[in-house]
Amino acid sequence: MRMVYFAWVREQVGVPEEDVAPPATVVTIADLVDWLAGRSEAHATAFARRDRLRAARDQNFVPLDTPIDGAAEIAIFPPVTGG
Amino acid sequence: MIRVVVSDAPIDIAAEMTLAEGAGDTQGGAVATFTGLVRGDDGVTELTLEHYPGATERALEALAAEASARWPLAGVTIVHRVGPMHPGDRIVFVAACSAHRAAALDACAFLIDRLKTDAPFWKRERLGAETRWVDARSTDDAAAARWRG
């Protein structure tokens, strides 16, 4: 599964994207964030504030409690600030 | 006609207006537009827009389609610039073309309010040697929420 990161999440993780293979116990995107936080100190820092994270599953915005459900691409990013 | 453009090129208002005005052929009696410019708040010298390629275009097209379903529109234009910009530069241009002004004005306001919360863009400001990510505003959420339900 492909992870993609944007804005300060990308900066704090240190890479714009990475391929991951989470265990079967990781069901929702929130579970995934918890699991990713254990990968490195940089991941832990980026994912420390759950309330400041938003997600997209296969390029559609979804809440963090959404099941991953075989997604090919999960994006994690801060609240958007366009316009 | 739905026109969605995400590009690092400067926004050509004259060209976009010509396209927006032509969307209704001779039936588009009203075109309402909104232009967003980079503000030089607090000594900001540069603003960089990051986005999620693919997802951005999909979100903007969905927004244009939603506006077209709510109002009788002949055309919707959303042009968003990405990459580095400077104070005074155009960052976004939205246009709605309809037979009459009420639909055009309402659709234009809907598009810019919802664009602020529904499309994956992130602003980073430079102030001299420092850079900072812009935080989302609760006033933007409130503006977008008034079009829901």
Image (cartoon, helix red, strand yellow):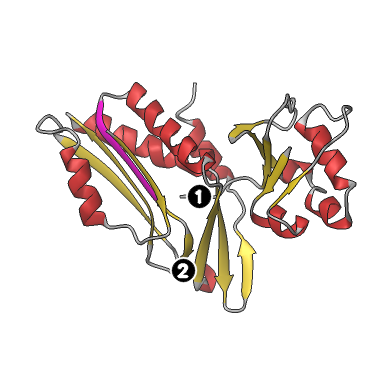
Q: Which region shows up in magenta?
A: B73-80
Please tell me whether mark 1 sits on a helix, a strand or a loop: loop
The residue positioned 85% from the left and 39% from the top of the image is A34
What chain is tagged by disc 2?
B
Give the residue type at disc 2: Gly
Q: Is residue B49 above or below residue A37?
A: below
Question: Where residue A65 appears, x then y in whole percent?
Answer: 75, 28
What chain is tagged by disc 1?
A
Q: In which quarter of the image is residue A21?
A: top right
Q: How crowded is mark 1: few (under 14 residues within 10 Å), some or many (20 or more)?
A: many
Question: Where residue A51 appears, x then y in whole percent?
Answer: 74, 41
Q: Residue A82 carries which label?
A: 1
The residue positioned 72% from the left and 57% from the top of the image is A15
Rounded to the nearest angstrom, the CA distance separating label 1 from label 2 is 16 Å
Magenta highlight on residue B32: no
Determine whether, in the image, residue A55 is placed left or right of residue A83: right
Q: In this view, does B95 lie above or below A15?
A: above
The residue positioned 71% from the left and 43% from the top of the image is A3
Q: Residue furthest left?
A: B26
Question: Where residue B97 appears, x then y in whole percent?
Answer: 23, 35
Q: In this view, does B108 lie above or below B14?
A: above
What residue would you read off at disc 2? Answer: B40
